[in-house]
Amino acid sequence: MAGDFGPGARKAMEIVVALGRIYGARRLVSVGSVQVAGVSYRNLGEAGLEFLREWADQGARARVPTTLNPAGMDLHAWRELGFSESFAHRQQAVIEAYRRLGVRITCTCTPYLVGNLPRVGEHVAWAESSAVSYANSVLGARTNREGGPSALAAAITGRTAAYGLHLDENRRASLRVLVRCPVRTLSDFGALGYLVGRAARNRVPYFVFESQKETCSDVTLKSLGAAMAASGAVALYHAAGCTPEADQPNVLVSSPETLIVDDLQPAYAALNADVRQIDLVWFGCPHAGLEEMAQVVRLLGGRRVRTALWITTAREVRQRAEIEGLVAALEASGGRVVADMCAVVAPMRELGFRTVATPSAKGATYLPSHAGLRVRYGTVERCVEAAVSGVWPG
Ligand code: F3S
């Protein structure tokens, strides 16, 4: 803060300390990694781009491994996908500013699939609500829901203020969720997350799957957490038998409230608009891993699609998918593995899309308000059928 590391570092430390004061932190902690959000030019605009450039001009550089959230387009295939020159030019300028700030240009909301994989108990400073949920809940790392500037400030200083979810006492659950209905598919986990997020009201949920804990996997927990983050800003949850802190003594407060979930239909009803014709089928929210891509390829079974079909993912994961033959298999059906981007922050209407089908509850929550699209939400199977026929089945 005295300026020994230059004006860029001083500004970053001022942000970290100001947040610490606001939230009553007693100390700072070193962070092992940072995930920065605020990348799409559509959201940042010229003012956001200038802010980043100015910080880079002041000599600010990330001091800890720092990864980046998705952009508003595929950084390589934007032209083929129909993005305009003017948008692409400004988006590239944002990426260049982050590069100068020392950020790894990963452009993904699943940094844990491309090497940013914190250890249990490690303090990190992550932005991107679904990644924050995954880091806290599934990996057992410790992060608050950082905003774009505060995450970048943590990257530049290597520090964050120790408050909120960095502290043991705030990681205890006060809402016990007894799940009494079957939760079988990816979209079921999303639906469950949507309902619990809406009921959570700043509480940490503790899930008890009364009949089927075997359905917990990295992929289904990713979907559950992303949905809760979207519908209720939940940054941490525990699930008995599934997540690393769930079995610790005192993980529940002494008299938690109980929420019983015995029907997922209200979530499906809330997330579905009454549309039949589908323009785009979107998988990969949060960004897909190989297993999810393989499932879509398997379900297509070589059939051609009538709609656009995109699976969004990290570029590094796309490269692995290429080696595995998944990209070629999907393209043979007319689909695309689209890297670097998120449809929620992309100019989707300018690309001509009006309706989307997705098995992502987070996507279904945000696409109407953020991208102006009407959404069908359902299982991966139904979404694949919609891609093949061009209409929502049933
Ligand atoms: Fe990722 Fe965008 Fe979904 S950031 S979680 S693909 S809304």
Image (cartoon, rainbow, N blue to C red):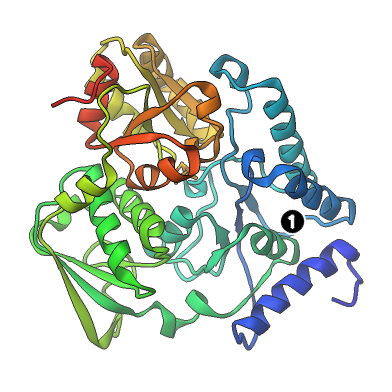
Residue at the far front in the pictured view: 274
Residue visible at 30% across and 9% down in the picture: 304
**Residue 374 as seen in the image, left or right of residue 68:** left
* Amino acid type at mark 1: Ala
Q: Name the residue under label 1.
A: 62
Q: Position of residue 4 (x, y in %)?
A: 92, 71
Question: Of helix, strand and loop, which one carries label 1?
Answer: loop
Q: Nearer the viewer, residue 353 or 26?
A: 353
Q: Nearer the viewer, residue 231 or 14?
A: 231
Work out which quarter of the rendered image holds the N terminus and state it.
bottom right
Q: In which quarter of the image is residue 375?
A: top left
Within 10 Å of the Cα at label 1, are there few (<14), some (14-19), or many (20+) other Cα atoms? Answer: many
**Residue 22 as seen in the image, left or right of residue 329:** right
Work out which quarter of the rendered image holds the C terminus and state it.
top left
Please tell me whether residue 332 is drawn above or below residue 273 in the rendered image.
above
Q: In which quarter of the image is residue 185?
A: top left
Please tell me whether residue 16 is drawn above or below residue 331 in the rendered image.
below
**Residue 141 as seen in the image, left or right of residue 126:** left
Residue visible at 59% across and 82% down in the picture: 23
Residue visible at 48% across and 38% down in the picture: 371
Residue visible at 25% across and 25% down in the picture: 276
Please tell me whether residue 171 is drawn above or below residue 336 in the rendered image.
below
Q: Where is residue 142 in the image (x, y as percent from the top left)?
A: 49, 69
Q: In which quarter of the image is residue 86?
A: top right
Residue 286 seen in this snapshot: no
